[in-house]
Image: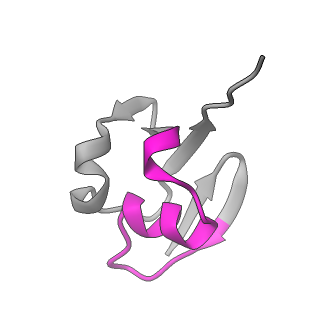
Amino acid sequence: MEICVNGEKEFLPQSATIADVLAARGNDVNRVVVEINGGIVPRENFAETPLREGDALEVVHFVGGG
């Protein structure tokens, strides 16, 4: 299936979840916020939130500074 992650097309298996996308991209689930089709997904739901053809994800990283 085709989805959009941060404005770029990605192709994934039909059974993919948000957790799968984050793992494939090397994202630390404790340092990101994920929005799917305009709504924020709670971190505890990443592994159980299935993706569908045409979904749009925005993955925002927390960055520390000093």
Which residue is at the far right?
A: 66
Q: Is 16 situated above or below 47? A: below
Q: Nearer the viewer, residue 31 or 8?
A: 31
Which residue is at the far front?
A: 66
> What span is in magenta?
10-32
Count of numbered labels shown in the rendering: 0
Q: Is residue 36 left or right of residue 11?
A: left
Residue at image point 38% right, 73% down = 16
Q: Is residue 52 in sight in this rendering?
A: no
Residue at image point 62% right, 53% down = 5
Q: Is residue 12 left or right of residue 10?
A: left
Q: Is residue 33 left or right of residue 43?
A: right
Q: Is 20 situated above or below 3? A: below
Q: How is the image coloured?
A: one colour
- Residue 26: in magenta span: yes
Residue at image point 68% right, 30% down = 63
Residue at image point 43% right, 70% down = 20
Q: Is residue 33 in sight in this rendering?
A: yes
Q: Nearer the viewer, residue 66 or 9?
A: 66
Which percent across, then down, holds residue 45? 24, 48
Which residue is at the far bottom?
A: 13
Which percent across, then down, holds residue 66? 78, 17
Q: Is 53 situated above or below 41? A: below
Which percent across, then down, holds residue 19? 39, 62
Q: Is 43 situated above or below 47? A: above
- Residue 63: in magenta span: no
Which percent across, then down, holds residue 55? 47, 53
